[in-house]
Amino acid sequence: MNRICVYCGSNFGDRKSYLETAQALGTVMAERGITLVYGGGNVGLMGAVADTVLGAGGQVIGVIPQALVDKEVAHTGLSDLRVVSSMHERKALMAELSDAFIALPGGLGTLEEFCEIATWTQLGFHTKACGLLNVDGFYNGLLTFLDHATQEKFIRPAHRGIVLADTDPAALIDKLAKFEVPVVQKWIARGEQ
């Protein structure tokens, strides 16, 4: 694993632990020589994880739409800042550049990006691991939902394992490195319930 895409909030959230964990993740990535790929912002947890990777001597690739550059939220001190024309282009390029994905705490954008990339793994569009850094139980509700959707037969049990989770950045990266995509021969049969 050479590059990990990190999705996270453009705010810091209400707990000090969110920032501390973002910084811990950045430190572990830099120590392991893993390049950070992220949304290119200089604010919130996004800016914190990027600053930590850079401060520890690591490499950072930011991908940001021109509209956000115009709002002056682009991080200008990155190793590599790529400006794109749309959010769709941003997400596609981040996926292409990355070997795995981690979501730190965040809001709707974080959830949307993470769920889309996990769906791409489920559909076989790529074979990249997806993990939630579950800081202080932040993602407990989402993990419970995924278990419930599996129990209710909206997610196959083999696919439930696509979304990994841990509370420790180093342990989560280790899980991502060991991930093997589940093989499901047939997505769904007509009339299957």
Image (tube, rainbow, N blue to C red):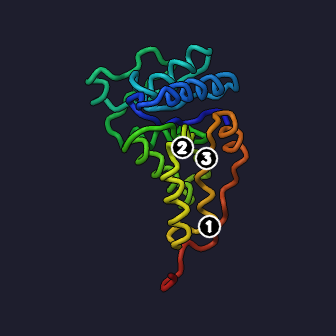
The span from disc 2 to disc 1 (Cα, nearest Å) is 23 Å
Tell me which amino acid carries mark 1: Pro
Assign a secondary structure to mark 2: helix
Residue ID for mark 3: 165
Q: Which mark is residue 137?
A: 2
Q: Name the residue rendered at 38%, 28% in the picture.
A: 83
Question: In terms of secondary structure, where does tag 1 sit?
Answer: helix
Q: Earlier in the sequence, mark 1 or mark 3?
A: 1
Label 2–label 3 contact, CB within 8 A: no
**In the image, residue 155 above or below residue 14:** below
The mark lying in front, picked from 2 and 1, is 2
Taking depth in this image into account, of 178 and 144 the one nearest to the observer is 144
Which of the 4 quarters of the picture holds residue 40? top left
Left or right for 175, reference 124: right
Q: Mark 1 to mark 3: distance in Å? A: 16 Å
Outermost residue toward the bottom in this view: 191
> Can you say which quadrant of the picture contains the N terminus?
top right
Residue on which disc 1 sits: 157
Residue found 66% across the figure and 44% down from its top: 176
Q: Are marks 2 and 1 in contact (CB under 8 Å)?
A: no
Determine whether 142 is above or below 31 in the image: below
Q: Note whether residue 102 is visible.
A: no
Of the pair 84 and 41, the residue shown nearer to us? 41
Point out the tag, 2 or 3, that comes first from the N-terminus. Answer: 2
Report the disc number at residue 63. Answer: none
**Foreground mark, 2 or 3?**
2
Q: Amino acid at mark 2?
A: Gly
5 left or right of 85?
right
Q: Position of residue 44 (x, y in %)?
A: 41, 26
User: Which element carries disc 3, helix, strand or loop?
Assistant: strand
